[in-house]
Image (spheres, rainbow, N blue to C red):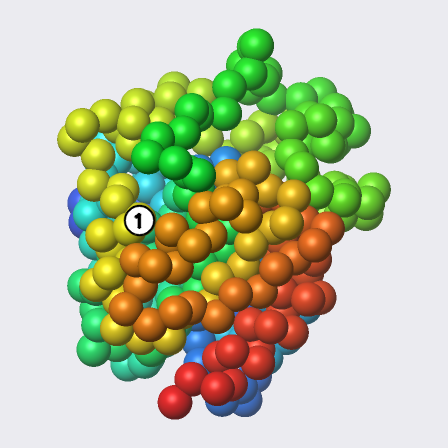
Amino acid sequence: MSDIGWRTGTADINGFRQFWRAWQPQGSTALPVLALHGSLTQSGMWKVLAEAAETIPMLCPDQRGFGLSEDPGEDSCAAFAADAVALAQQQMPARYAVMGHSFACSIALDVARLAAERVAAVVLVDPVVPAGPRAAARTSSSAPPEQFETREQAERHFRDSEEGAWTDAMLRRFVDDVMLRDGGTWRFPYTQARLKRLRAFTASPASDFDLFALAAAVRCPVLVFRGAMSTRFPAASEPRLFAAFRDEPKLVLCPQSGHFPTATDTGGVAAALKDFLGRVA
């Protein structure tokens, strides 16, 4: 199937059906990217970036339990990473970059470890990095509704809950790309129960989402985007993360962005991504 130049499909991965979308520019020689969305979105979050970057092929799966993918019931970083590696074995060429947003930054780093012979570079988009040993999870006095009756209500939710300088056009595109349509309603690409289960695991002693240990194992070039207005990746936590890598990553600061630089500084992120991948040997 196609959607404005995109191909979509499904694959049987590790016992479940996984939906994916792929941006495949004709004749491109750029290093392709396996792009992994965060816990509040789905593969559609990458559409605006891929279209802005134009020449970078991207494979963007809905991760287990998100978007249009089935939920096999396992929440470990290792399970998410194994899914990504298996899909890349089916769909990607021998050499590619892996990019993750938010909690998926840990997954991207684990993919780089598991497939070190194939992963040429890692890109982290506003990883969740506590400023100290522990940081309290973002909380709200009430959970958002499962769905919204209008696009405007969905846009208002993200304007109220996310940092960054969002224009009306940015919000409209973001909602179009990450929300799912059920008839006339707009719903999140996950259930609240699924999100609660994932967050309970990542906060538990059993969690293997150890960003710092995973960073220490990386042996390829790393690019990090940080939203200057992001509370998930504050400036105070930057030295701690960078010290975990063997070689210091390249940092791109997005001054008007919060947790979603791909949506609020799309052009800047696209330009920096193209430059970085073009320099990867």
Q: Does residue 87 appear to the left or right of 266 in the view shown?
A: left
Name the residue located 57 percent from the left edge and 10 percent from the top edge: 141
Which residue ends up furthest to the right in the rendered image? 168
Mark 1, Cα crowd under 10 Å, few <14 / some 14-19 / many 20+, is many
Q: Is residue 206 above or below residue 62?
A: above
| x 83%, y 42%: residue | 168
Residue located farthest toward the top when viewing the structure as drawn: 141
Q: Is residue 25 visible?
A: no
| Looking at the image, residue 215 lies above or below residue 167 | below
**Residue 202: horizontal and vertical position, in percent?**
29, 32
Measured from the top left, where is residue 207 in percent x and y?
21, 34
Q: Quadrant of residue 69?
A: top left
User: Secondary structure beneath disc 1?
Assistant: helix
Q: How many marks?
A: 1
Whether residue 223 can be seen here: yes
Q: Is residue 158 left or right of residue 107?
A: right
Q: Residue at x 50, y 45 (%)?
A: 236
Q: Nearer the viewer, residue 59 or 266?
A: 266
What is the x, y in percent for residue 130? 41, 38
* Residue with the mark numbered 1: 211
Q: Residue at x 65, y 74 (%)?
A: 271
- Vertical relation: 50 (above or below) 153: below
Q: Quadrant of residue 109 in the image?
A: bottom left
Placement of 145 over or under 257, stated as above or below: above
Residue 107 percent coordinates (x, y): 31, 51
Amino acid type at image mark 1: Leu
